[in-house]
Amino acid sequence: MDKNSDQQIKDLLSNPDTQRRGFEMMVREYSEQLYWQVRRIVLTHEDSNDVLQNAFIKAWNGLGSFHGDSKVITWVSRIAINESLDFVRRQKNMSLVSTDDDESCVANTLMADDYFDGDETEAQLQEAIAGLPEVQRTVFTLRYYDEMKYSEMSKLLNTSEGSLKASYHIAVKKISEFFKSHD
């Protein structure tokens, strides 16, 4: 989306008479991008749809907190990512098996998902990513899959660019080690 469209959505969202139209435009423009951000954290299609729907509900309810200081996608991405991370935390807390067991069955879960169109290597990559600490996992997925710039990520996650670069570097190293140990 170009800068003019972002400004158009901001203008629509800032006016109570046009908020609904602005929100609908935001959903149309950003749903796919947000879905994939959520999906890379949550992993399954059904859960991703639920999390994304919850994120849009939170965005709608939080329109008063959006002052237009950032891009619309940055604001709504922050909501979607936080909702995704909250979902993952709730799943881990509800799980009766250990986290190691959860991480080792990620590949099996993905391969069983009717909407997963990757191969075994992609499933292993997702398993390696699932084994990362939360911050490294988030930074890696935003950088690797979304090719997000560190400056944009810094605004999204309220963290310094240097810290994000270090987290990404460590995540890449851990993923490489994961693949070396699974050869």
Image (tube, helix red, strand yellow):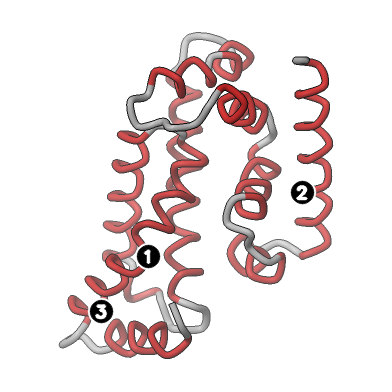
Name the secondary structure under disc 3. Answer: helix
Q: How far apart are marks 2 and 3 (CA)?
A: 34 Å
Image spot of residue 113 (x, y percent): 37, 24
Image quarter of residue 123: top right
User: Mark 1 — residue?
Assistant: 30
What count of labels does the image hold?
3
Image quarter of residue 64: bottom left
Q: Which residue is drawn at 82% across and 21% down?
A: 180
Give, as a three-letter code, the residue at label 3.
Gly
Q: How far apart are marks 1 and 3 (CA)?
A: 12 Å
Q: How far apart are marks 2 and 1 (CA)?
A: 25 Å
Q: Residue at x 66, y 50 (%)?
A: 144
Give, as a three-letter code, the residue at label 1.
Tyr
Q: Do the residues labelled 2 and 1 touch (CB within 8 Å)?
A: no
Quarter of the figure with the N terminus: bottom left
Q: Could you say which disc has been placed on residue 74 in the image?
A: none
Give, as a three-letter code, the residue at label 2.
Tyr
**Along the line of sight, which residue is nearer the eye, 22 or 33?**
33
Image spot of residue 60 (x, y percent): 27, 66
Q: Residue at x 61, y 47 (%)?
A: 141
Image spot of residue 161 (x, y percent): 77, 65
Compare marks 2 and 1 and give the one earlier in the sequence: 1
Compare marks 1 and 3 and give the one earlier in the sequence: 3
Compare marks 2 and 3 and give the one earlier in the sequence: 3
Q: Could you say which disc has been placed on residue 168 in the image?
A: 2
User: Mark 3 — residue?
Assistant: 22
Name the secondary structure under disc 1. Answer: helix
Q: In this view, does 53 lie above or below 31?
A: above
